[in-house]
Amino acid sequence: MPQRNETTKDRIISAAAELFYREGIHAVSVDAIAEKAQVTKRGLYYHFRSKDDLIAAYLEMRDQPNLEAFQRWFADAEGDLPAKIQAIFRKLAKAAGQTGWKGCGFLRTSVELVQTPGHPAIIAGRRHKTKVEDWLCLIVGELHAPQEARKIAKQIILLLDGAFAVVLLHRDPSYMESAGEAAVTLLRAATRD
């Protein structure tokens, strides 16, 4: 049932987001999205030139909320920088233990589109990951020189994205916790240098 004040375009993106996240972008047809959004296929194409544009819109819709969740978890955590970074991993581990968790939509989409590096969704995913890295660089930069902060931010991104992949493979959220512990070790070692 459409929600009040929700535009048709928003309804299409919401329907696509639910289906893409649950089933994967290749498994979901435009017909299925149109049906879920309660629009005609023609209506869907009125708002999106192609399924590719809709896939990009799905990721763009996830961008800011995902970054804001990381920022909120960091801000709400107690302790020093390593403890606050570890809190992000703990929140992700908790989310990974929920029914229906399917990992990082940005990474899953990039895997499905590995043969098309210029795809609009790959570009949207790259922008998102860069925003997260830039934010990490900013907060790490409060304690480290810019070049060192960038290096540490990249290492934390590798821990995050690696944990997403391994948790999804093993269906074991403890890998996210282990990645958080590695981030603490990394940050504490960098502070001692």
Image: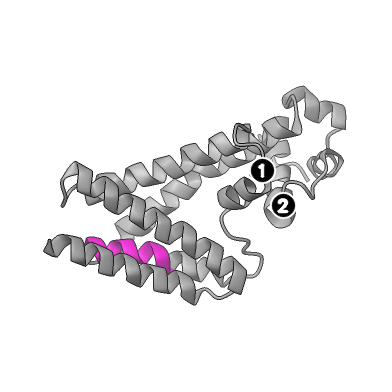
Q: Quadrant of the C terminus?
A: bottom left
- Label 1: how many Cα within 10 Å (few below 14, some 14–19, many 20+): some
Within the image, what quadrant is residue 98 found in? bottom right
| Residue 10 x %, y % | 67, 35
- In the image, taking residue 181 as reference, residue 79 lies left or right, namely left
Q: Residue at left 23%, top 60%?
A: 81
| Residue 110 x %, y % | 60, 46
Q: Nearer the viewer, mark 1 or mark 2?
A: 1
Residue sitting farthest toward the left? 193
Q: Is the residue 3 above or below the residue 72 in the image?
A: above
Query: Looking at this view, is 35 or 113 the one in front?
Result: 113
Q: Is residue 89 magenta?
A: yes
Q: How is the image coloured?
A: one colour
On the image, numbered disc 2 is attached to which residue? 24
What SS does tag 1 mark? Answer: loop
What SS does tag 2 mark? Answer: loop
Amino acid bearing label 1: Leu
Determine the CA span between mark 1 and mark 2: 11 Å
Mark 1 or 2 closer to N-term?
2
Q: Which residues are magenta?
A: 81-90
Q: Residue at left 67%, top 41%?
A: 115
Within the image, what quadrant is residue 155 found in? bottom left
On the image, numbered disc 1 is attached to which residue? 113
Q: Is residue 142 magenta?
A: no
> How would you classify the magenta stretch by its main secondary structure?
helix
Q: Are marks 1 and 2 in contact (CB under 8 Å)?
A: no
- Let me know if residue 72 appears in the view: no
Q: Is the residue 81 above or below the residue 43 in the image?
A: below
Q: Residue at left 44%, top 59%?
A: 160
- Let me know if residue 160 appears in the view: yes
| Residue 165 x %, y % | 55, 62
